[in-house]
Amino acid sequence: MTSSSRCLLDQTQFYEGFKDGYTDCMDSGKEEGRHAVLKHGFQVGEELGLYRGCVEIWKSAIRIDQNSFSSRVQNASTSWPSSEEFRCSA
C-alpha cells in the first residue's frame, strides 16, 4: 500500500467516523433537548400556577375584607388580570 492510498484510506475513515459521530450526537442531542424542554416547561407552568393561585386568594381576601391589605395593595389589585385573562387559548 502506498502512502497516498494509506492517506486516502485514513481520510475516508476519518470522514465516515465524523459523519457517524455527528449523526449520533444530533439524535441524542435532540432527545436530551426534548426532555429538558418538558422538564423546564412543566416547572414554569407550575410556578405560574402558584402565582395565579396567590393572586386569586389575595383578590378574594380583598373582596371579603377591604382592610386585609394595605391601600397600596388594594390599588394595585385593580390592575391584576382576571381568571379569564389567565386562560390560554389553544
Image (cartoon, rainbow, N blue to C red):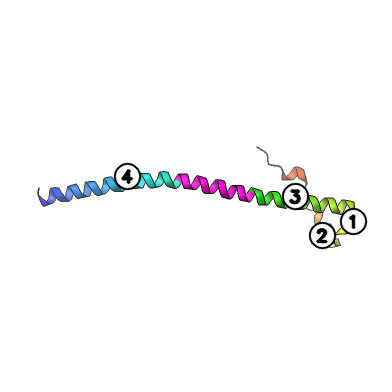
- Quadrant containing the C terminus is top right
Q: Which residue is mark 4?
A: 20
Quick one: label 1 or label 2, which is nearer the N terminus? 1
**Horizontal arrangement in the rendering, residue 12 relative to residue 71 (left or right):** left
**Horizontal arrangement in the rendering, residue 37 relative to residue 56 (left or right):** left
Report crowding for label 2: few under 14, some 14 to 19, many 20 or more residues within 10 A (C-alpha): few
State how far apart marks 2 and 3 are (Cα): 16 Å
Residue type at mark 4 is Asp
Q: Nearer the viewer, mark 4 or mark 2?
A: 4
Say whether residue 39 is magenta: yes
Q: Which label sits on residue 73?
A: 2
Q: Which residue is mark 1?
A: 66
Q: Residue at x 33, y 47 (%)?
A: 21
The answer to whether residue 78 is visible is: no
The answer to whether residue 32 is visible is: yes
Residue type at mark 1 is Gln
Residue lying at the far left of the rendered structure: 2
State how far apart marks 4 and 3 are (Cα): 50 Å
Quick one: label 4 or label 1, which is nearer the N terminus? 4
Quick one: label 4 or label 3, which is nearer the N terminus? 4
Say whether residue 31 is magenta: yes
Quick one: label 1 or label 3, which is nearer the N terminus? 3
Q: Residue at x 30, y 48 (%)?
A: 18
